[in-house]
């Protein structure tokens, strides 16, 4: 199944299991993205503590940048003057920008109207205003390959009535986004909201499908609702999205969350967890998470993980890394970040291979047993 649009070419290569885990691939103006895919987060135009070439080496085909952070002050002008985000970030593969909505809606003092959202910028500065047209305009100027619709993300535990209001507003805003011109290479993804309510998720999916986006996201998850509710939302929503477009689960997450969502048919993921945990000294291994600061690693000459092919594991022992961590050496953050991103990159490559082989379910169960039983030692 292939669909050629002006923006993205999507191919569904294999489907595995009763829920429909998908092996797919799409091509943006900046190359091929093999799915399921994990997108490292470069909030401020940089994946923290990692060189772009090292991020590419971890297997990442696409990274994410945040519209909110890249639009403050005169940053959009700077990016535009540099020739767009790809050259600004020294990243020649695919880039996705979020709409800025998620950050704005988490700010205290925001005011939401039908037009858009106004929010305080900080002491002595005028309030800023963001609406669907402004978000599209900023994202057009930033120049990412994938652009997200401006949506409202209601708190997951808000009452159903207000989640419904917010869902309807999100649909009206999505229509306004769809009408706002982007550059020809940019693909706009619609976002399905609807909180933890089945009928609202169904309505959200139908509203977004009507607008015929080149890709679809499930938003409003990974906001404190927990694993059970998150997987329920994905189980309801994923089957309602078109088979022939990419499906992106926003802000998820831990390896176990990603595996569950891959099994339910999601293709793309982003999260700050691998990079944030790395900087704090938490490293992922196939036998669970490892805290490099723990005393038991003090005399360990082995790498973080002997099976890992990353530069940190090829070159450094746990005891050296532990020393760098406690010495607050910037090198520790760089090495830990490379390792954690490689762990996520390898995890996604394993998912792709096992879906192709038609054994994703068994493989996932075995993977989780080993991961859950261990402490990385
Ligand atoms: Zn490694």
Image: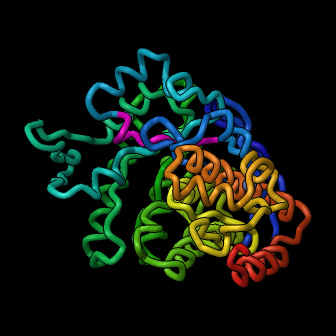
- Tell which quarter ligand 1 is in: bottom right
Whether 24 is drawn above or below 21: the answer is above
Query: How many discs appear?
Result: 0
* Residue 68 is inside the magenta segment: yes
Task: Name the residue: 52% across, 53% down.
Answer: 327
Location of the C terminus (image quadrant): bottom right
Whether 204 is drawn above or below 175: the answer is below
Picture coordinates of residue 238, whole percent (x, y): 60, 66
Picture coordinates of residue 30, whole percent (x, y): 66, 29
Task: Name the residue: 68% across, 53% down.
Answer: 339
Q: Would residue 209 be visible to someone looking at this image?
A: no
Picture coordinates of residue 68, whole percent (x, y): 34, 41
Magenta segment range? 62-70
Which image quarter: residue 94? Answer: top right
Q: Residue furthest front?
A: 299
Q: Is residue 164 left or right of residue 91?
A: left
Which image quarter: residue 167? Answer: bottom left
Which image quarter: residue 126? Answer: top left
Of 256 and 168, nearer the camera is 256
């Amino acid at each position: 199944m292939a669909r050629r649009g002006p923006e993205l070419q999507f191919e569904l290569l294999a489907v595995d299991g009763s829920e429909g885990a998908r092996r797919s691939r799409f091509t943006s103006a900046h190359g091929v993205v093999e799915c399921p895919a994990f997108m490292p987060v470069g909030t401020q135009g940089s994946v923290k503590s990692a060189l772009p070439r090292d991020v590419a080496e971890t297997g990442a085909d696409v990274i994410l940048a945040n519209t909110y952070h890249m639009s403050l002050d005169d940053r959009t002008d700077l990016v535009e003057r540099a020739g767009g985000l790809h050259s600004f970030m020294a990243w020649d593969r695919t880039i996705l920008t979020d709409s800025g909505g998620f950050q704005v809606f988490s700010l205290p003092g925001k005011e939401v109207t039908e037009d858009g959202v106004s929010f305080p910028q900080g002491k002595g500065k005028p309030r800023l205003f963001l609406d669907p047209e402004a978000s599209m305009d900023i994202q057009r100027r930033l120049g990412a390959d994938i652009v997200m619709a401006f949506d409202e993300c209601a708190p997951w535990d808000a009452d159903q009535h207000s989640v419904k209001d917010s869902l309807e507003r999100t649909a009206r805003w999505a229509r306004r986004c769809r009408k706002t011109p982007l550059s020809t290479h940019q693909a706009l993804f619609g976002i399905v909201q609807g909180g933890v309510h089945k009928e609202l998720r169904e309505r959200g999916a139908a509203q977004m499908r009507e607008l015929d986006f080149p890709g679809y996201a499930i938003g409003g998850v990974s906001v404190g609702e927990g694993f059970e509710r998150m997987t329920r939302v994905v189980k309801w929503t994923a089957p309602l999205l078109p088979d022939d477009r990419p499906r992106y689960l926003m802000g998820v997450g831990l390896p176990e969350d990603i595996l569950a969502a891959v099994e339910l048919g999601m293709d793309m993921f982003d999260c700050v967890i691998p990079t944030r945990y790395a900087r704090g000294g938490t490293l992922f291994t196939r036998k669970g998470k490892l805290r490099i600061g723990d005393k038991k690693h003090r005399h360990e000459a082995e790498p973080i993980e002997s099976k890992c092919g990353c530069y940190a594991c090829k070159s450094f022992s746990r005891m050296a890394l532990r020393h760098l961590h406690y010495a607050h050496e910037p090198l520790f953050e760089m090495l830990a970040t490379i390792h954690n991103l490689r762990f996520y990159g390898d995890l996604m490559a394993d998912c792709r291979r096992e879906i192709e082989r038609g054994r994703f379910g068994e493989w996932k169960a075995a993977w989780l047993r080993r991961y859950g039983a261990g402490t990385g030692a």
